[in-house]
Amino acid sequence: MKLFQFLFRFLSLLLFFYPLNVVAQCYSTPESQGLESENIQFCFDSLMKINHGEIHGVVVMRHGKIVAELFPEPFKREFPHTLYSVSKTFVATAVGLAVDDNRLRISDRVMLFFPEFYHDTISDGWADMTIRDLLTMSSGFEPDWNMRNVQSDWVQSLLSKTVNHPGSHFKYDSMVSYLLSVIVQKVTGETVLDYLNKRIFSKIGIDDAEWEMSPEGYCVGGWGLRMSTLSMAKFGQFLLNRGIWNGEQLLSSSWVREMMSVQQKADKSRFYGFQMWMHDDVDGAFRADGALGQYIIVAPKEDMVVAITQCNRGNGILERKILNDWLLHKVSDKPLRESDSYPKLLNARYSLPVAEGKSSLSKHRKLLDKDIFLNQNTLGWKCIRLNSCSDRLKIEIETAMGELMIFHASNGKWGSDTTHVCPPYSINALGRFSGISRRFVVSSSYGMKNGILCLKILFPNWISGVELFISEENGEIKVKAKENYKKEFTFLK
């Protein structure tokens, strides 16, 4: 143990003198950065016990060093993850780059960038709306979350809306961020992703970013970005550095400061910057925030970044309180004495629960070797076939589009395969998955309990997955599903 600690301290000291772009990827003991390993482990243990969802990845950084990570099986450090509305913060960053390049100003009228839609009868609201109004979610038009699911001409549909008093009232809307994405592409000639790749991502070591594209050929902006939890943490560190990386000012510090300052009041207790939320109960902290609990928390006074990916159906208050109470509120300005808690943290192994039950299927042969046709459903699955394959269960799922997803479930542990078939997705926008590489990991487990076959199916380089419960009663096979920790079951058959 002493030899291990000596080698680790030597490596940490060596990495300390690397340039900033390397430092942000370096590992250090929590104690050397003013955090207690015991508190971090208690934080991780508490996150893993949340019963309304599951944790997929956590990266904790202090003073530019990674001090702890959590990637429970079957999730892995290198897997990208769907970020939902965390994407909006990256759009605001691209807008800031365009401002730095003098391609636009936040005081510019939005209609300046859409002359093809301008006409004499345009409402005063549209004539008055500015880029700033979009950045602060105060566009003045009513959100329509179904429009993207049924319309292919998103820009025209948005510009036909009635606008009242832009800049005065907060109304959260992902299509507002889409308009910003369109404007950035119009003034730069590049998609938001290409612009960020060239100007920021390539400089700070993010090489796994993908972004869904709209039917009109723009990054969808308000959602659809995909990258690893580690890349999220690097980006958080970039914001913490006020746009500086390896001594180079990649984004003006004034813009980062504006992004992470209160610009609009959302309600009595929540405040908004430029496409970022003020973080709860940590002075000066802001966060990028996405559905189902995706966060990049940037805390300047604590000199900390916490990135987390998950699939949680709660309101996020519990997870954020755990992170605050055991990480952000527990920092010391000075290094702490090393303890035996660090090796325990380093050697801790976490796994998401596998399906409960035995492996034997001998009493339930009626479930095997047949096509189980399903009712029309939101999963987009048409038929399931189950076959015993050595010590694993082979699952074939045919989609409504005629695609075939094949994978194998293990009993008592996670088995993993890959597929080119798109996984279930809670967003139904037209053209979804466009721009995303089609190589998805499928991890699954199974168990027989009380005559019911339970299948847990996860898509760890996308987001979460589905639990299936298959049984046979009076000669009839019944199938019900629970997607991404929804409270209710969906009866598929």
Image: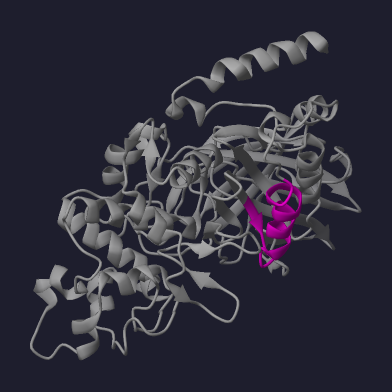
Image quadrant of residue 66?
top right
Q: Quadrant of the C terminus?
A: bottom right
Residue at 76% of width from left, 41% of height from top?
A: 40
Does the magenta run of residues contain 315? Answer: yes
Image quadrant of residue 314?
bottom right
Horizontal side, residue 480 vs residue 262: left or right: right
Q: Nearer the viewer, residue 286 or 480?
A: 286
Is residue 379 visible to us here?
Answer: yes
Q: Nearer the viewer, residue 109 or 485?
A: 109
Does the magenta run of residues contain 98? Answer: no
Q: Which residues are magenta?
A: 310-330
Residue at 55% of width from left, 41% of height from top?
A: 229
User: Given the current orientation, which residue lies at the most extreme front position?
Assistant: 334
**x, y percent for residue 139:** 34, 78
User: Given the current orientation, which residue lies at the most extreme top position?
Assistant: 3
196 shown above or below 78: below
Is residue 153 visible to us here?
Answer: no
User: Given the current orientation, which residue lies at the most extreme right position?
Assistant: 450
165 shown above or below 77: below
**x, y percent for residue 76:** 62, 34
**x, y percent for residue 198:** 27, 38
